[in-house]
Amino acid sequence: MKEDDETKLLQKLVKQRKDSLEIYQQQKRTDLAQKEQEEIEVIEKFLPKQLSAEELQAEIKNIIAETGATSSADMGKVIGAATKKLSGKADGKTISATVRELLGK
């Protein structure tokens, strides 16, 4: 298994647990939510350091400049480039939300 594949697998495992965590929190199941949170923390130790919100915004602003994007119509192009460049450093949901925020202005 290549390192890229390993990272993608670990990210998938974290995403599954975050989804479960959200459901358990909505259902007020703190016992199950705690277990999911602990598993997330363990898995994240094996992933590359995630970008902070500020670092992610800076990276995406650079990608917007590189691609020449000017409006929300260019969102797909920016998200594609950002996902490729930032793979393993930020999850797709966060990348999409940040691009939407920056291009929506």
Image (cartoon, rainbow, N blue to C red):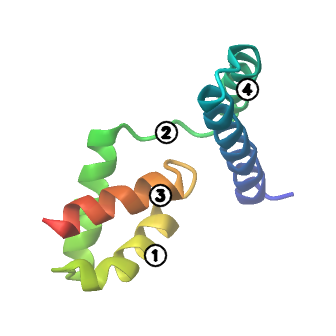
Q: Nearer the viewer, residue 10 or 103?
A: 103
Give the x, y percent position of residue 75: 33, 77
Instruction: Determine which quarter of the picture holds residue 101.
Output: bottom left
The amino acid sitting under disc 1 is: Gly
Say above or below: 68 vs 18. Answer: below
Give the x, y percent position of residue 77: 37, 82
Residue at image mark 3: 86
Residue at image mark 2: 50
Could you tell which of marks 3 and 1 lies nearer the N-terminus? 1
Looking at the rendered structure, the secondary structure element under dot 4 is helix
Say above or below: 49 vs 84. Answer: above
Residue at image mark 1: 80
Measuring 61% from the left and 27% from the top, which residue is drawn there? 25
Looking at the rendered structure, the secondary structure element under dot 3 is loop
- Residue furthest to the front: 27
Give the x, y percent position of residue 86: 47, 58
Q: CA distance from mark 3 to mark 4?
A: 25 Å
Could you tell which of marks 3 and 2 lies nearer the N-terminus? 2
